[in-house]
Image (cartoon, helix red, strand yellow):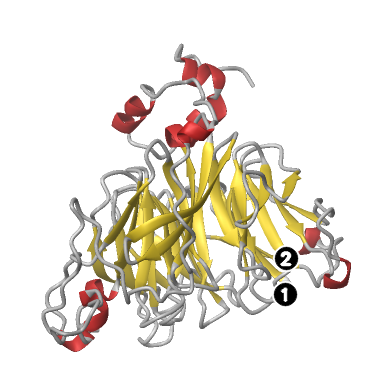
Amino acid sequence: MPAETDSSPLFTLYPIRATSLQRYLPVTFLEKLMRVPSVCPETNSSNRPPVPQFVNPKKRFGQDAHPLTHPAPRAVDCTANPGRSPPRPPSLAIPLNSRPPPSMAAMLEFRTPGFNPYAVKYSPYYDSRIAVASAANFGIVGNGRLYSLALTAQGVQVEKSFDTNDSLYDLAWSEINENQLIVACGDGSLKLYDLGVDEFPVMNFHEHKRETFSVCWNPVTKDTFVSSSWDGTVKIFFPPPEQWSPTRNFSIKTLPIGNCTYSTSFCPSNPALISAVSSDSHLRLFDLRTPSSAKYHLVASIPVHAPPPGMGGVGVGSGATPSELLTHDWNKYNDTVVATAGVDRVIRTFDIRSPNGGPLALMQGHEYAVRKVAWSPHASDVLISASYDMTVRLWNDGGGSAAHGPAAGARVGRQMGIMNRHTEFVTGVDWCLFGVGGWVASVGWDERVLLWDANMLMGHR
């Protein structure tokens, strides 16, 4: 592909990634990106953070954790028994109905110097283990680093880290091995790492022709994962359980999208149903149970920005200008509802049983593109979003209101709170599956991982 007209070495070496970012980044920040070094940092042991002694990851998050400040004081719960030691963070110790006004006093922080995080995921096995995928130089050029973090009495500590030759954009924990996780790389590969193995991945899958931007492990069959790429394809790695082999490092099926595909996911209750969103403003659904001759298993293609039938009006909910979709997620309690978001800053929910019925709900408030949405695993009507406006926002989609119908139009979701402690683009957010329900991890290009209690944003919900 010919280089851009800009004479900068960044555009000369990597015109594809730079122009892709130009679509939705503010000009002032692009000027900032132009000043980053175009030479990849060396991958050597001096760049790696010190690895502390192994900490038992089964230790419950919140029992010994304290906020990280400089110096890091221990969080104090004024309502607790003075003799209790150690105290729990205030967000866990104070009942929700007696909590003071929203505060981030119990926020935990971890820094990734030299690397800008792109994705964060809580372990599905331990509430004290978190993984972060990051990239040097904002993911435009340079190396990547995978962090496995442990929550300890001393704060957030590096349990293990792996360096890669290219940027890391996404990750997923294995559903069959508590120590394994897979990452999506900028060179088009997927790498499977084991926390018990030093330095190198235990498997490498390299089939995508451009950047692999999303990866998801099947939560039902647990031996399946799917990836999407800027090359316009979704690839499924689906070896039968009885034939699984660590040497079987090739996909068994490719689903053509035809456009840059930013996000793909499995339905949380149906292992044969796969979703994907792409730059052409469509949410696509594939059912692997259908014949492959039938449009490559495609069963629905939802134009996210199209108006519902019989409603020719204009506006965000009906007939907005199509723009790139960057993220989507399935509702964990209603497996027919999917939330989408992207460059136009609006979060929409859809019922896949009515692909032409328009959005169920609209949530507006972000000032720049929405990079990540995630439904709560603890409530059916709560979701969280991360955006390039440097905020994380908590939403209620209005699921408890009257039933949706074309005549009534889309519901208007309610913004429940804003977390604005990040100082650069927020690129990833995830919910903890355990505990009282509400702990969230967020990452951004400010080289920070923040862990905090979303219940403090909900108020007296």
Question: At which x and y percent is residue 18?
Answer: 48, 29
Q: Residue shown at 69%/50% (left/top)? A: 257
Which picture quadrant has residue 284?
A: bottom right
Question: At which x and y percent is residue 12?
Answer: 53, 16
**Can residue 78 be seen in the rendering of this structure?**
yes
Which picture quadrant has residue 266?
A: bottom right
Q: Residue furthest top?
A: 7
Residue closest to the eye, 363 or 29: 29
Question: At which x and y percent is residue 282?
Answer: 57, 56
Q: Residue furthest front?
A: 53
- Mark 1 sits on what residue? 221
Which picture quadrant has residue 114?
A: top left
Residue contact between numbered discs 1 and 2, judged by CB atoms under 8 Å: yes
Q: Residues within 10 Å of mark 2 (few under 14, many from 20)?
A: many
User: Could you tell me which secondary element the residue under label 2 belongs to?
Assistant: loop
- Mark 2 sits on what residue? 224
Work out how far the residue at label 1 is from the one at label 2, CA to CA, in angstroms.
7 Å
**Can residue 315 be seen in the rendering of this structure?**
no
Q: Is residue 183 left or right of 68 when viewed as pictured?
A: right
Residue closest to the eye, 81 or 104: 81
Q: Residue shown at 40%/74% (left/top)? A: 409
Q: Is residue 394 above or below residue 379?
A: above
Amino acid marked by disc 1: Thr
Question: At which x and y percent is residue 191?
Answer: 67, 48
Amino acid marked by disc 2: Thr
Q: Residue shown at 31%/59% (left/top)? A: 392
User: Could you tell me which secondary element the residue under label 1 belongs to?
Assistant: loop
Q: Residue shown at 61%/43% (left/top)? A: 185
Instruction: State the mark number for residue 436.
Output: none
